[in-house]
Amino acid sequence: MAVPLRFRSVRDVILAVDLGGTKFAAGLMTLRGELLVRSRVEIDREATAVPLFDLLSTLVDEQLESAADHDARVRAVGVGCAGPITPNCETVSPVNIGGWREFPLRQRLADVTELPVFGDLDAKALALSEGWLGAAKGVANFCAITVSTGVGGGIVVDGELLDGASGNAGHIGHVIVEPGGRRCGCGARGCLEAEASGLAIEAITGRPPSEPTYEVMQRTGRLVGRAVASVSAALDLELVVIGGSVAFGFAATFFNAAQEEIDRHPVLTGNRRPRLISARLGDQGPLIGAGAVGIRGMRRRSAPA
């Protein structure tokens, strides 16, 4: 699934911004998907709204200043943000960032940068990047999942990224995988995010996800596979791309357990079980995805009515 490139100069760039549960990142991306420069800062998840945005604003200002050093003209800002959000990131309420509840992110970034700002869920941004340049290139029906501090998803059907009524389509982190399980930040019990995210793993085991046992890696993979099997059965997907620090850190043990769980579930006659694969763009994927959100937004804005 290609992201059309309709601008005049390869040195026109998008200011890409990725907002996760433990860090903010920003970079300058060309319209061909090349990251010229990037930086990141760790965040205090207990911080209030103003210090959090001040930190982001400093990061963004640094990138804008570096544009001149790279002979680049910033055309727009593309944002991938942990959810839930409202369309175009007009407001954001990331479950794992308590200081932002209905925070007016798009307008605040527009005020700081004086540029058009286009936003979407971080996992939907990952789906754009992996479909454009990564593991799902040329695939029309797939899901991209981030298993990190939280768990998110983006779904592409018939070559189109699904948005949904509120812009939050693909939130696979809130598929129930353990009925009656742990309370999730969304209020439900047994959500994938409440059972298999980095924060959940630490709460359950008392150890950070960077120090997992074999059993924890296997359980996390099985739960992700369970959610994938349900979503794929509903949407007839052919591929699932998984990224995020937890998935990458748990490596083959996680991926094998997830695929085994998918294979264990029966499928309808004529359907195929989806193939599971690691995100190809690695730690660049979230920022490339945020940049792709910016390109998608510019394309939509310039399309004839």
Image: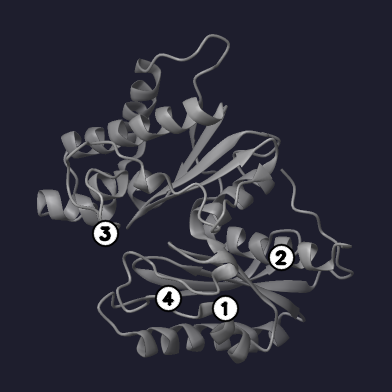
What residue type is disc 1 on?
Arg
Q: Which residue is mark 3?
A: 185
Q: Check disc 3 and report its element: helix, strand or loop.
A: loop
The reply to whether discs 3 and 2 touch (Cβ–Cβ < 8 Å) is no
Dot 3: few (<14), some (14–19), or many (≥20) neighbours within 10 Å? some
Distance from disc 1 to disc 3, alpha carbons, whole Å, reads 24 Å
Where is residue 199 shown, x and y percent of the image?
A: 24, 57
On screen, 219 above or below 184? above
Q: Check disc 1 and report its element: helix, strand or loop.
A: helix
What residue type is disc 4 on?
Glu
Distance from disc 4 to disc 1, alpha carbons, whole Å, reads 11 Å
Q: Residue furthest front?
A: 165
- Looking at the image, which residue is at 48% across and 65% down? 85
What residue type is disc 3 on?
Gly
Distance from disc 4 to disc 2, alpha carbons, whole Å, reads 21 Å
Where is residue 132 shown, x and y percent of the image?
A: 68, 48
Q: Which residue is mark 2?
A: 297
Q: Residue furthest left?
A: 206
Q: Earlier in the sequence, mark 4 or mark 2?
A: 4
Q: Which residue is mark 4?
A: 102
- Residue 60 is drawn in which quadrant? bottom right
The reply to whether discs 3 and 4 touch (Cβ–Cβ < 8 Å) is no
Q: Which mark is residue 106?
A: 1
- Looking at the image, which residue is at 54% across and 86% down? 108
What residue type is disc 2 on?
Gly
Distance from disc 3 to disc 4, alpha carbons, whole Å, reads 15 Å
Q: Which mark is residue 9?
A: none
Nearer the camera: disc 4 or disc 2: 4
On screen, 186 above or below 107? above
Image side of residue 59 versus residue 147, left or right: right
Q: Nearer the viewer, residue 80 or 85?
A: 85
